[in-house]
């Protein structure tokens, strides 16, 4: 569990002060995967680095696994930090050490006996699928392989919490997906709570349960990933959602709208999960004297839940259209009429 309570951080430089975090309150439950998204400079790195005190907040409190990390000192703080693993955008591996020795670093720090080190590193390399690379050096690995080693190293001390600082930003889309799936396994197999910071909404969509959107050091919106994707409130959030779910009116639909006819209406039916637009469409055709054409479909998956919209054209006499519209309104579906100025 990670909890930020009114956390602020002010950086003082020679000529000015920067408020990198401004009264941030946010909670990640045990076993959750939470993502924080924001543009460059929003304060994401400062936020994630405050969890293990790589940055010490100037105000507020950070609670990790039930204890205020900021009140700890000396050996107690070291012990608490061992319970927090971290992976980085540029992997931060030691270039002069083998893969085996890189993964062993946290174990060596606490003087783990050699036989135990060997056993644990072998387990970890197997978990990340790189048992055959134990004697290689980081420069001999691909980006994805380096991040797998970063993950193995971060897990060496059996942490309850894993911090991911733009962990996939340097990777291509396919490798990103493989690393995200590995993080999902870390979460489900070891019940590790994961906090991810990213500027890519695709990362949030693929593995997060919860998301917070940051801007100018503040959290401007937060919620479950499904809620934030389906009902984004803030313009910045809408822009992030748009980067993975295209909700613009396509040119072909625009042309129909421009022609404008009282015998045609266009609707966008949004759906989440099991409910889909299909039964509605066949019912419309059966019950009313209208024709229905699907103009545009847009379906994505948030974790394993289908999410998207269908844009349909309904044609008929004005009274049939009105009756069909009332029927749609009575349904428990998110339906809106598509208009040019929308
Ligand atoms: N050590 C520092 N000294 C002074 N200002 C800093 C320092 N670290 C960060 N800042 C400032 O704090 C603000 C937040 O920075 P931060 O790196 O947390 O943002 P970010 O969202 O992680 O951005 P990016 O995605 O570019 O890393 C920025 O205005 C940045 O310039």
Image (cartoon, rainbow, N blue to C red):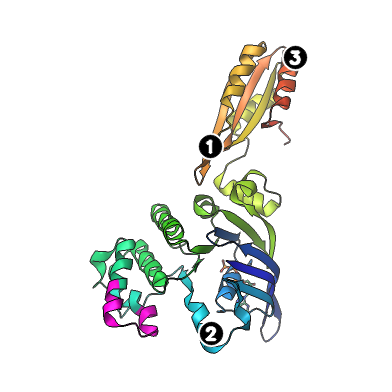
Q: Earlier in the sequence, mark 3 or mark 1?
A: 1
- Mark 2 vs 1, N-terminal side: 2
**Residue 106 lies in the magenta-colored region:** yes
Find residue 299 and name its label: 1
Q: Nearer the viewer, mark 2 or mark 1?
A: 2
Q: Is residue 245 visible?
A: yes
Asked whether residue 104 is drawn in magenta, I would say: no
Quadrant for the C terminus in the image? top right
User: Measured along the vertical axis of the image, is residue 7 above or below residue 173?
Assistant: below
In x, y percent, where is residue 43? 63, 69
Residue 76: which numbered mark, if any? 2
Q: CA distance from mark 2 to mark 3?
A: 74 Å
**Mark 2 burial class by Cα count in 10 Å: few <14, some 14-19, many 20+:** few
Q: Earlier in the sequence, mark 2 or mark 3?
A: 2
Give the image location of residue 150, x and y in percent: 39, 69
- What is the spatial separation of the Cα atoms under label 3 and label 1, in whole angstroms? 30 Å
Q: Which residues are magenta?
A: 105-119
**SS at badge 3:** helix
Q: Position of residue 282 (x, y in %)?
A: 58, 18
Q: Characterize the local packing of mark 3: few (<14), some (14-19) or many (20 or more) Cα atoms within 10 angstroms.
A: some
Q: Secondary structure at mark 1?
A: strand
Image quarter for ligand 1 equals bottom right
Q: Quadrant of residue 110?
A: bottom left
The residue positioned 69% from the left and 22% from the top of the image is 265
- Residue at 40% across / 67% down in the picture? 151
Quadrant position of the N terminus in the picture: bottom right
Q: Which mark is residue 318?
A: 3
Q: Is mark 1 within 8 Å of ligand 1?
A: no
């Amino acid at each position: 569990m990670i909890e930020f309570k009114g956390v602020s951080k002010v950086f003082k430089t020679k000529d000015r002060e920067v408020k990198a975090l401004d009264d941030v309150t946010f909670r990640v439950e045990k076993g959750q995967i939470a993502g924080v998204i924001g543009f460059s400079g929003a304060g994401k790195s400062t936020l994630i680095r405050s969890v293990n005190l790589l940055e010490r907040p100037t105000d507020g409190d950070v609670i990790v696994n039930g204890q205020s990390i900021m009140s700890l000192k000396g050996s107690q703080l070291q012990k608490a930090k061992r319970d927090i693993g971290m992976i980085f955008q540029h992997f931060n591996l030691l270039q002069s050490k083998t893969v085996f020795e890189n993964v062993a670093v946290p174990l060596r720090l606490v003087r783990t006996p050699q036989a135990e080190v060997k056993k644990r590193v072998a387990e970890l390399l197997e978990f990340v699928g790189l048992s055959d690379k134990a004697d290689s050096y980081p420069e001999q690995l691909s980006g994805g392989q380096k991040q797998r080693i970063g993950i193995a190293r971060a897990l060496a001390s059996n942490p309850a919490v894993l911090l991911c600082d733009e962990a996939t930003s340097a990777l291509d889309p396919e490798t990103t997906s493989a690393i995200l799936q590995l993080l999902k396994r870390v979460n489900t197999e070891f019940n590790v709570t994961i906090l991810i910071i990213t500027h890519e909404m695709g990362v949030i969509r693929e593995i997060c349960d919860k998301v917070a959107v940051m801007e100018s050091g503040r959290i401007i919106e937060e919620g479950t990933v499904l809620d934030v994707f389906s009902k984004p409130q803030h313009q910045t959030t809408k822009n992030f959602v748009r980067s993975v779910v295209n909700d613009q009116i396509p040119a072909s639909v625009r042309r129909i709208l421009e022609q404008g006819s009282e015998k045609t209406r266009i609707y966008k039916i949004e759906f989440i999960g099991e409910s889909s637009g299909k039964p509605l469409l066949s019912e419309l055709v059966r019950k009313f004297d209208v024709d229905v054409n699907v103009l545009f479909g847009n379906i994505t998956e948030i974790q394993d839940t289908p999410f998207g919209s269908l844009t349909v054209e309904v044609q008929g006499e004005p009274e049939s259209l009105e009756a069909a519209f009332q029927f749609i309104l009575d349904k428990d579906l998110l339906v809106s009429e598509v208009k040019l100025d929308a």
